[in-house]
Amino acid sequence: MSYLIINHIPQFNFQANRVLTYGDLACNSETIKTNIPRIQNFEDWYIVWSDMAESAERKMHFLHAAYYYRMAEFFLKTTDERKEDTYNKCIENFYRAFDLELQLHYEKIQVPFEGKNLYCLKLSPLHSRGTVVVCGGYDSFIEEFVLQVHDLLSQNYEVLLFDGPGQGKCLQEKLYFRFDFEKATSAILDFFHIKKCAFVGISWGGYFALRSAAYEKRISAVVAYDVMDNGLEVMTNVFPALVCQIIRLAYRNKWKRLLNGLAGMIAKKSVLADWALSQGMYITGTETPFEFYQNLSHHNLLGVTDLITQDVLLLAGEKDHYIPSNQFYRLKGSIHNAKSLTCRSFTTAEGGEQHCQIGNHMLAVHTIINWLNQHFQN
């Protein structure tokens, strides 16, 4: 596999590649290559993916239907009455696929947390060589990562996938996105009586994993897949350079009216920006762009990296359009007290240049597995 250009809108193209990267298990690639190029806007996106999902469901291709419904749901705003129903269809088809197509042995477990619940999938081999805890990132949910971590199970690792604040079903309980993710991690480790584990954080989860490792020493090895050390920088980097500078300046100087006004103007001119701000305020439980950026500003590893004392694996893609490349090099230079530090930036030549190596994600998966095998042998 490699990263394909099948739609001229970069965000649409990347999301389509998130499904294509899993190959025939997750989709009919020819169907996607035929239909996705004609998508021009959010409504097209919803209609095309929904139609493909319904067709796959009728044919009892449940995993295909699950990923197609996930894509259909992705760009719906929270105010759209279709969003909840599409999400529910997505989840329903994932579990049909886990049971009937993958014949996966799993447990669905709710873990109490601050009067609400975290949601966990436990995948257990017959003979476990160690436990790997896995979390996603920005507005993700655990079911979509099962294919990504399935090879860990085949390597006899017990895998605990969990939704934390701001993710999956946690959002339905109004557990919002937060910087101190280690508290959710500790709740998971306590509940399952885990004394030693590795922690893999996917996408924004790279920040969550490193942050958790800094404060939770039952984590003996940590993988940032990919790196992320500054949330405000990430979510303002999407704007043109001048707009990015103005928003950051307005935030630093607490010019709330200017920042909110500028964000509103941008949202009126760009449906992608409008969706991004709306989605961001939804998962953070905030009411204005300023409050949203304020929440993200706390997702920062400055002053935290010296507390990381475990074995560490940092991954990056050289053309990641979400995470600025300087974050990889900044983290590489700021983790001073790790037991060991391994860094890998994947290149275009090997097909791993995109965020989380979408297009050739098995490059990253194999790198992680080989690294974990060495860790658990020690």
Image (spheres, helix red, strand yellow):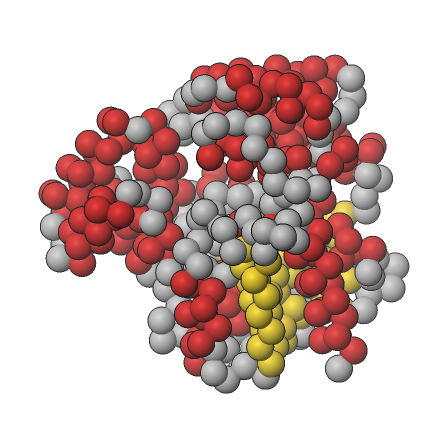
Query: How far across and how far down the image is residue 367, in percent?
Result: 69, 62
Depth check: 75 or 109 in front? 75
Determine whether, in the image, residue 337 is placed left or right of residue 283: right
Residue at the spot 17% in from the left edge and 44% down from the top edge = 259
Query: How far across and how far down the image is residue 353, in percent?
Result: 56, 51
Q: Picture quarter containing residue 347?
A: bottom right
Residue pushed farthest right? 126
Residue at the spot 12% in from the left edge and 50% down from the top edge = 255
Determine whether, in the image, residue 76 is placed left or right of residue 267: right
Count of numbered labels shown in the rendering: 0
Q: Picture quarter containing residue 188?
A: bottom right
- In the rendered image of this protein, does residue 187 appear above or below residue 81? below
Residue at the spot 50% in from the left edge and 19% down from the top edge = 39
Depth check: 24 or 310 in front? 24
Depth check: 248 or 215 in front? 248
Q: Look at the image and tell me in which quarter the N terminus lies.
A: top right
Tell me if residue 312 can be seen.
Answer: yes
Query: How far across and how far down the image is residue 128, in percent?
Result: 82, 65
Residue at the spot 59% in from the left edge and 58% down from the top edge = 346
Depth check: 139 or 268 in front? 268
Tell me if residue 188 can be seen.
Answer: no
Q: Picture quarter containing residue 306?
A: bottom left
Query: How far across and how far down the image is residue 67, in percent?
Result: 64, 31
Q: Look at the image and tell me in which quarter the C terminus lies.
A: bottom right
